[in-house]
Image (tube, rainbow, N blue to C red):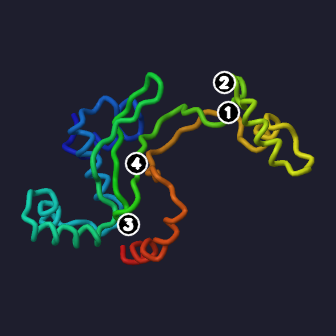
Amino acid sequence: TKEKGGRGMLSALSRLEEWDRLSSDEKREVAKNVEQRLPLFRKILSQEEQEFLEEESSEEEDEGKEELRKEHPVVFQDLRVFRVGDQEHEIAAFSFLQTSALLLVPGGRNVSLGYDAGMYDGFPSQEDIDTYSNQQYGMDWPPLSEMIEQVVSSKRSVTLHPFLIDASPNTSDLDNYETLEKAVEDS
């Protein structure tokens, strides 16, 4: 049985197939549970604070919620649907310090990582090759396809644990380093 937002559903994060079998409401429960388990980035909300954040409120109460969110920089937002080819997955989205969007990526066994030249018909393209060649500036670099094989790891199968990834990486996030450092120190 699946405990409400508990270990039973949290374990679904260890395999994408199990995560996909959860209903949207169950995924939201898991995401809220994960939000509460991020000790490096937030204090644990009291039950009263959690209820306060979840209830509908007046404009004045919204200001109080905003202050509470500042103390708790990682907040579950909602589920987002991602499609690639014939695959479609609902993924939990969080905000971090009210600026970055983080996605909770479920784990999996036998996940393929790395580069397999045979998988990418037409890669690198002639345009990629021309751009690379123009950037050599007289250097004695190998052809692009050889360079890719030298610098990219070979295809392999691994087990991935669930992780959060920044959905919109941006170098300007370095400006928030002091805020991040303070959030970690305060936790």
**Residue under pointer 4:** 103
Quarter of the figure with the C terminus: bottom left
Query: Are dots 2 and 1 in contact, CB under 8 Å?
Result: yes
Q: Which of marks 4 and 2 is nearer the N terminus?
A: 4
> What kind of residue is marked 1?
Lys
How far, Cα to Cα, is label 2 from label 3? Answer: 39 Å
Depth-wise, is mark 2 or mark 3 nearer the camera?
2
Q: Which of marks 2 and 1 is nearer the N terminus?
A: 2
> What kind of residue is marked 3?
Phe
**Residue under pointer 3:** 41
**Residue under pointer 1:** 155
Depth-wise, is mark 2 or mark 1 nearer the camera?
2
20 or 1, which lies in front? 20
How far, Cα to Cα, is label 2 from label 1? Answer: 10 Å
Which image quadrant for residue 91? top left
How far, Cα to Cα, is label 4 from label 1? Answer: 24 Å
Q: What element carries label 1?
A: loop
Query: Are dots 2 and 3 in contact, CB under 8 Å?
Result: no
Is 69 left or right of 185, judged from the image as shown?
left
Q: Is mark 4 on a helix, strand or loop?
A: strand
Across and down, in percent, residue 42 comes to 33, 67
> What kind of residue is marked 4?
Leu
Q: Earlier in the sequence, mark 2 or mark 3?
A: 3
Q: Earlier in the sequence, mark 4 or mark 3?
A: 3
Tell me the residue at 30%/29% (across/down): 21
Tell me the residue at 66%/24% (across/down): 119
Query: Are dots 4 and 1 in contact, CB under 8 Å?
Result: no
